[in-house]
Amino acid sequence: MIVAVIVISLVIGFVVAAGVVGTQAQRLGRERREPVWRLAEAADLVADLVPFDIAAALDPSELEALLRAHLNQLQFEFPAMPDGDDPDAESEQGTTVTEDQSSAADLYRSARRDGLEVSLEQVQAVTEAHLEYLRLIGALAIVDPDGN
């Protein structure tokens, strides 16, 4: 009799555990996977995406420093707001990343100020490739300006 009670309680425990694990697995399966930026992965992909002459001229430590600086620029430096706009409105809408030349020029000035011996052409190529890496991992999405 005791053996039957133990077996039944083990079966009930297994069914409950399987149900809990199954529902949590379904819930986690429906959630969007958060992108994770990895420096080594980003450096490898960016080195593959930039033209050979630019990749050959960049030292790996310079490339990593440029990638860190570009990520910091994207995260912490907000684009200039037009006159009359509320700066708090930016936090409600989120930051928009554009592929304009001023972003690369700002990064170039920052890199030169930090002592990196890089050219504007190298910085532009690295920023374009880095934005492509961010799109690939899902950290950036293309937004239609018309809202369609």
Image (cartoon, rainbow, N blue to C red):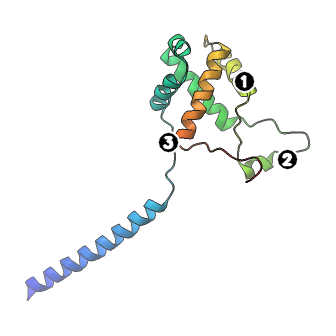
Mark 2 or mark 1, whichever is nearer to me:
1
Q: Residues under labels 2 and 1: Cα distance?
A: 23 Å
Q: Residues within 10 Å of mark 3 (few under 14, many from 20)?
A: few
Q: Quadrant of the N terminus?
A: bottom left
Frontmost residue, 6 versus 24: 24
Frontmost residue, 18 versus 7: 18
Which residue extends farthest front? 148
* Residue at position x 61%, y 42% in the image: 140
Give the image quarter of residue 127.
Answer: top right
Residue denoted by label 2: 86
Is tag 2's residue or tag 1's residue first in the polypeptide sequence? 2
Is tag 2's residue or tag 3's residue first in the polypeptide sequence? 3
Q: Residues within 10 Å of mark 2 (few under 14, many from 20)?
A: few
SS for tag 2?
A: loop
Q: Quadrant of the C terminus?
A: bottom right
Residue denoted by label 1: 106
The relative height of residue 74 versus residue 56 in the rendered view (above or below) is below
Q: Amino acid at mark 1?
A: Asp
Q: Residues under labels 2 and 3: Cα distance?
A: 31 Å
Report x, y in % for residue 106. Answer: 72, 23
Left-right relation of 7 to 136: left
Q: Which mark is residue 88?
A: none
Report x, y in % for residue 130. Answer: 57, 30
Report x, y in % for residue 131. Answer: 60, 33
Residue denoted by label 3: 36
Q: Amino acid at mark 3?
A: Val
SS for tag 1?
A: helix
